[in-house]
Image (spheres, helix red, strand yellow):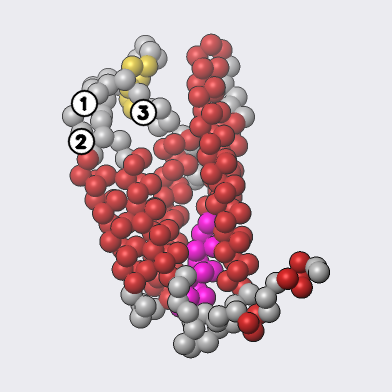
Amino acid sequence: MTAEGRLARREDLEPLSVRGRAAGITTGSCAVLAGLVLMWAAWDALTCPLSGEEGTAICNRSAGLGGLIEMFALGLFVSGCAILWRTGRRLVTEDGLSGWTWGEGIAIAASGLTIGLLIPTFHCPAGYQLTAVFHVCRGATMTPEIIVHPPTWLGWKVGAVAAGIVVGIVVARWRRLPWPVASVVTIAAVGGATWYLADKAIGLSLF
């Protein structure tokens, strides 16, 4: 029996509602695009061009982090393709399932958690600058040192996580929410988290 023969016919699958179909396409598309962007961004970290003793040390660390991001991004991309394929096989009816709305909710909550975890909770004293990748304070002598100060952005961290969870629950459970609104909110949350992850974790700006 071929693989196509083992697949259930579209007519035998439970159909999706319009909101459920839109949610599945939005969730899958966000995962695919986020995976592609992160793979592109992590490639520069894997091919770090810095030279010299200090440059080699930085490249060793950035390559390790870039490899982790690359594997995570690949998983996102494959998962997104699978979601799009599964969603595309189902028919659409007015009273169909809207279960894919939980995918949008999880994506929004995960985006808030990602942003919250990456917001720094310490700052550098006068004359020092906080590096984007390793969050160390670098002065005029270019000698890195870790500065531990009382949290200065803790409220923003908690706020980002709380907002992501609350908005994610609302989008996931509010079945009457118009699908364009849910899709726009999901895309904005995932897009913002993807950019922030690439910029802060890998140390690259996408623009």
- For disc 2, the marked residue is 152
**Residue type pointed to by label 3:** His
Residue 79's quadrant in the figure?
bottom right
Q: At x 39% / y 72%, what residue is drawn? A: 181
Q: At x 48% / y 35%, what residue is drawn? A: 202
Q: Is residue 84 left or right of residue 194?
A: right
Magenta span covers which residues?
18-33
Q: Position of residue 6 (x, y in %)?
A: 73, 71
Pick out the residue farthest to the left.
150
**Residue type pointed to by label 2:** Thr
Pick out the residue farthest to the front.
1
- For disc 1, the marked residue is 149
- Examine the structure image and report whether residue 111 is included in the region drawn in magenta: no
Q: Contact (CB < 8 A) between labels 1 and 2? A: yes
Nearer the observer, 7 or 131: 7
Mark with earlier residue (3, 1): 3
Q: At x 61% / y 54%, what residue is drawn? A: 78
- For disc 3, the marked residue is 135
